[in-house]
Image (cartoon, rainbow, N blue to C red):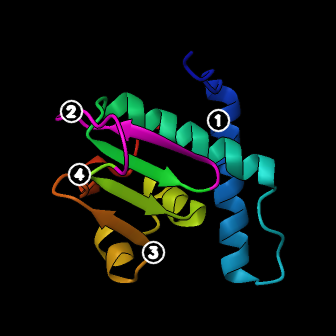
Amino acid sequence: MPRARIDQTAGRAAVRAAIAAFAARRDDASAPPPTRDELATAVRYLLQCLSDAAPGKSVEVRVPPFGAVQIVEGPRHTRGTPPNVVELDAETFIAIAAAGLDDWASAVAAGRIHASGSRADLSHLLPIPW
């Protein structure tokens, strides 16, 4: 059974809240982080938008512990570890995918994105229209 879709209004509100919280923390380390619910909803909504923008099953994008999607047309992966995997933390995902506050190349170089496989470069898909 497919996962329930996140409502656009709720998803956008969560993304905006997470971006604002991360921006506040950059200016003041004592500022509170986004709530776990805001962060989870923001990540899952952006993964949903990414899946809509690049349907397919050849690359798995993981943002632990909040979610994972398979995207990009190509050979379908069915069992075991996929040959094309992208894994990154929630803050990096939101900064690149939603806010355009970071870019793919610098995040990969800094080790904030772990990408393996010939199809794992998602720079052409980011930021995501949300």
Residue 80 at what x, y percent from top left? 37, 46
Q: Amino acid at mark 1?
A: Gly
Magenta region includes residue 51: no
Which one is earlier in the sequence, the residue at label 1 or at label 2?
1
Which one is earlier in the sequence, the residue at label 4 or at label 2?
2
Q: Amino acid at mark 2?
A: Glu
Q: Which residue is mark 4?
A: 124
Contact (CB < 8 A) between labels 1 and 2?
no
Contact (CB < 8 A) between labels 4 and 3?
no
Between 114 and 29, the one lying in front of the other is 114
Which of the two discs, 1 and 2, sits closer to the camera? Answer: 2
Which one is earlier in the sequence, the residue at label 2 or at label 3?
2
- Residue positioned 41% across, 49% down in the render: 61
Considering only vertical position in the picture, is 105 above or below 50?
A: below
Q: Which residue is mark 3?
A: 112
Q: Which residue is mark 1?
A: 11
Which one is earlier in the sequence, the residue at label 1 or at label 4?
1
Extreme residue toward the top, this view: 1
- Residue positioned 59% across, 56% down in the render: 64
Q: CA distance from mark 4 to mark 2?
A: 14 Å
